[in-house]
Amino acid sequence: MELTNNTILITGGTSGFGYEFASRLIDMGNTVIITGRDQAKLDLTKKKLPLVHTFQSDVSDPIAIKQLYADVTTQFPSLNIIINNAGEMRKINLQDESIDLDNIVREIGINLSGPIRMVQTFLPHLKTKSSAAIINVTSGLSLTPFPIAPVYGATKAGLRSYTKSLRVQLKNTNVKVFELVAPGANTPLNDQFAGEVDSKSFMEPDKLIDVAIKGIMKDKFEIYPGLARIMYILSRLAPGIIFGQLSKITEKSLAQTNS
């Protein structure tokens, strides 16, 4: 996949992987559009990356996605790549009766329904392009559950499954489907686990995106940077090892919360 002279839309582009993708892809000669829910963060990103184009939008809102489609395809008809990056990860105690049901399922709307709606909305447009791509950002936790973040893991496993099916269904089109299986990284998403998970093993976002871009350019449809590759191998050969370690972290965290 050529990564120059494209028009690329990145959801959740104000921090973490989305910001690094935007910065790198602009430097490579692409037109880059980012979305985010917080206008102030979008404005700050615009100051840091003057060439980026910003749209305030919420991937969990179907109406907002329809409006985003209308605005982006009108202003940027050459759009040919979508990176579904926006996501939320939360520690949730499933025995906490104070958490209402809408709160429990919030991540599903952002992490799973959001990317699916984005794809289904933009797919007819992408299919008109001679070269197009969809890049879905999943997680090493799509390979094995992290019980302290039960809904997050479920959404990423679901997105991984959907991405595989999407790739098969689009095989005879010009739309390539990539999955970036991200390991733990030093992004705001993981700040809540400080002191519980060894951050020394976390990957720096710029290095992770460097691996991702090289993989996309080589048409590697499943990309496993850093520890994600090890997680993938262990999930097939000895899945209980990783799950056991993540379960211990969960048990310790819940014990501290309940004490």
Image (cartoon, rainbow, N blue to C red):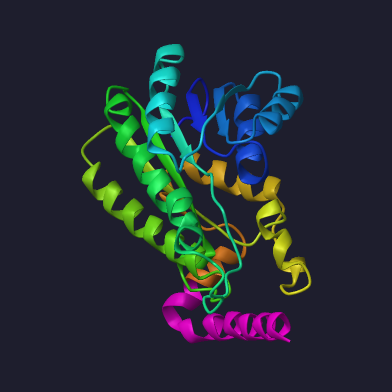
Q: Is residue 241 above or below residue 15?
A: below
Q: Observer-nearest residue: 247 or 165? A: 247
Q: Quadrant of the C terminus?
A: bottom right
Total labels: the figure holds 0
The relative height of residue 131 versus residue 163 in the rendered view (above or below) is above
Instruction: State the residue at coordinates (48%, 65%).
Output: 151
Whether residue 12 is situated above or below residue 53 in the rendered picture: below
Q: Is residue 254 magenta?
A: yes
Which residue sits at x=45%, y=63%?
101
Quadrant for the N terminus in the image:
top left
Q: Which stretch appears magenta?
A: 233-259
**Residue 120 screen position, x and y as percent:** 30, 37
Residue 249 lies in quadrant: bottom right
Left/right of residue 235 with respect to residue 48 in the rendered view: left
Q: Position of residue 233 (x, y in %)?
A: 48, 73
Residue 25: x %, y % from top left = 60, 30
Q: Which one is in front, 86 or 18?
A: 86
Q: Is residue 116 magenta?
A: no
User: Where does residue 122 sit, x and y in percent of width and height?
Assistant: 34, 30
Residue 44 vs residue 68: left or right? right
Tell me which secondary structure the magenta stretch mostly adopts.
helix
Residue occupying image coordinates x 35% and y 51%:
163
Residue at 44% x, 31% y is 64
Q: Nearer the viewer, residue 133 or 121?
A: 121
Residue 162's place in the image compared with 83, above or below, is below
